[in-house]
Amino acid sequence: VPRTVAPAAPASTLLAAATPPPPAAAAQGATTTAPTANLVVLQVGTGSSPCACTGDGTPTEDPNCKYNPSRSGCTWSPGCNWDGESHFGGWCSGASSCVYTRGETACLGAAGSGCHWVPATRPLNMTAEEEADASGAAQSLTAANDANARALAEAT
């Protein structure tokens, strides 16, 4: 079954801390001084924040959404959406407790608490999500390998 692929969003840059694995020399008992963290450049989608993950835009939105660089992590987080996409088909809005509610049924069940359901503005693009996850994993692996190689070079 062919899947529709949306055009890729232009990438922006986000810096994230990554802890490299210990150098091989240290694992063999040699004493070395290796860096404990490095800055890793990650390519993520664009949006109102460095990531394309956002909350619902209201004062009670989940403030953590804008820090989620993972497309799938975002779309699986209640209250968050990736450029209008969500695995839940939308998100719960209203009181601050509403944004953590998963799914339309639970949200509508909490309507007495001021919650209301907001349908997703775009259909979920699984192909783009899978490609973003694969790209992010490859970037993380490359960054870890590069950091390890630098640490080994500095240790010798």
Image (cartoon, rainbow, N blue to C red):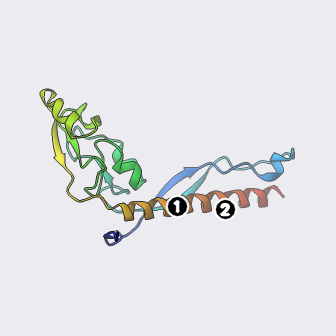
140 displayed left or right of 97: right
Dot 1, how many residues are within 10 Å of its Cα: few (below 14), some (14-19), or many (20+)? Answer: some
Q: Secondary structure at mark 2?
A: helix
Q: Tell me the quarter of the picture where residue 83 sits.
A: bottom left
Q: Amino acid at mark 2?
A: Asp
Residue 13 appears in the rendering? no
| Label 1 vs 2, first from the N-terminus | 1
For the residue marked with disc 1, what is the amino acid?
A: Val
* Front-most of residues 99 and 5: 5
Q: Secondary structure at mark 1?
A: strand
- Label 2: how many residues lie within 10 Å, few (<14), some (14-19) or many (20+)? some
Q: How far apart, in angstroms, are the residues tagged by discs 1 and 2?
A: 12 Å
Q: Which residue is mark 1?
A: 41
Given residues 143 and 135, the one toward you in this image is 135
The answer to whether any part of residue 147 appears in the image is yes
Where residue 9 appears, as percent x and y from the top left, is 34, 68
| Residue designated by label 2 | 146
